[in-house]
Image (tube, helix red, strand yellow):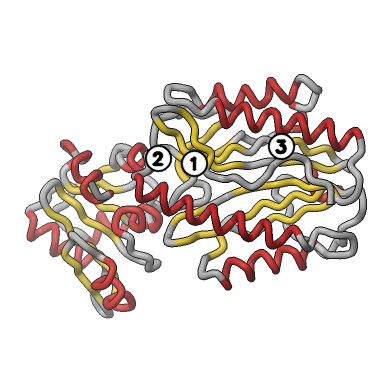
Amino acid sequence: MTNLERLRASLNGTGAFLVNDTTNVQWLTGFTGTFGAVLLTPDSGVFVTDSRYAIQAEEQIKGLDVRIFGVPRRFTDVINEEATRLGLAQIAFEKSIPYSTWQDWTTQVGGVEWVPADDILRPLRMVKTSDEVGKIREAIKLAEACLGHSVRMLQPGVTEFDIGLDIEFFFRRNGAGIGFPPIVASGPNSARPHARPTDRALEKGDFVTIDLGCVLDGYCSDITRTFVIGPASDRHREVYEQVLKAEVACCAALIPGATGVAVDQLARDILNEKDLAKYFGHSLGHGLGRAVHDLGSLGARSTDIIEPGQVWTVEPGVYIESFGGVRIEDDVHVTPEGPEILSSYPKGLTEL
C-alpha cells in the first residue's frame, strides 16, 4: 500500500483534506520540488503546483491528476475550481499552516468552510513502510562511510572547520544532500550539544564529537560518535563508558508497547549511577525519516508509544563545561520482535 493509499484509507469522515506542508507532500507523493499541495478525498485527488515544476510534476506524481498554474493565476484559483468541480462544502487543512495563509484561503476560496484536521498524518508517518526503512538504511550506510572517511583527519593541528567541510564534500560527491550542518566539536567545544565547527585546532586530550547525517533518495540518517585524541584519562573513560552503557540499554528498550518517557528516563537513571544525569539536558531521541527530526520524541514530555515500523534516534549525552562532552547516537528500527539497530559503526572508546 502506498502512502497515498494509506492516507486515503485513514480519512474516514474527514472528507476533503488539503496537504501542503512540504515534508508531508514529499512523503505522500515523492515530489521533490519546494512547492506543491495535494487535495485528497476518499475517492479522488489532485496535485497542484506552479509552472516552475510542470515537467517535474509530470515525471514524479503517480496516482493523482496534476494541476499546474502560472501568473496571473493563483494557487487558490485552482483550489476554488477543484472545490466547485467536486462539490466540496468543507476542506480540512493541516494545523501547521500560518494564520495569514488561512486568511487567504477563507477569503479567496468561495463557499468552502476551512476546518483544522485531526492529526491524521502523524501516526502514518511515524510507522515506516519496508520501502522507507530500506531508504533509511542506505542513508545510514553512506553516513557511516562518511564517518569512517573523516576519522583520518582527527589528529592534532586539524581544525574543526576542515573536518566539517570534508564531511559536506563527501556527501555531495556521493550524490546525497546534507541532512543538517555537521557537528564537529573538540575539547571544551564538545560540551556544547549543538556546537558548530570553528577554527579551533584539535589537541591531545580532546574529546571530539562528530554528529552527521545525509539525505539520500528523500530519507535521512543521523549518527554520532565521540573519539579521544591521544591517551584517554580515567575521567574520559568513566564518562564515555557510562554514556555508552545508557545508549546500549536504551536501544534495547525500544520494544513495542514501551513509552518514549520510560526509555528517556532509563538513560537518566543509568547516567545517575555516576552522578552524570545532571549533565544531560536534552531529550534522548527523535523520529527519523523524511526529516532528520521526524515526528515523535523520546523525552520527558513525550506522549508516544513505541510501535513496530517506527525508526528512532537514541542519543544520550553528557556535557561538562571546560572538560568536554560525549554523545553516542544510533538509528533504531522497531520490529515486532524488538529493536533492530540500523547503524553499525563501532562505538567502543576509540583513542586516536
Which quarter of the picture shows residue 56?
A: bottom left
Q: Are marks 1 and 3 in contact (CB under 8 Å)?
A: no
Q: Which residue is mark 1?
A: 287
Q: Earlier in the sequence, mark 1 or mark 3?
A: 1
Residue labelled with disc 2: 126
Instruction: Name which residue type carries label 2.
Output: Met
Q: Secondary structure at mark 2?
A: helix
**Picture coordinates of residue 106, whole percent (x, y):** 25, 54
Query: Is residue 146 left or right of 198 when viewed as pictured?
Result: left
Q: Residue at x 27, y 72 (%)?
A: 59
Dot 2 or dot 1, earlier in sequence? 2
Under mark 3, the amino acid is: Gly
Name above or below for residue 145 compared with residue 162. Answer: above
Provide residue 300's location: percent of width, then percent of height. 58, 26
Q: CA distance from mark 2 to mark 1?
A: 7 Å
Looking at the rendering, which quadrant does residue 181 occupy?
Answer: bottom right
Q: Which residue is mark 3?
A: 317
236 displayed left or right of 150: right
- Mark 1–mark 3 Cα distance, whole angstroms, equals 17 Å
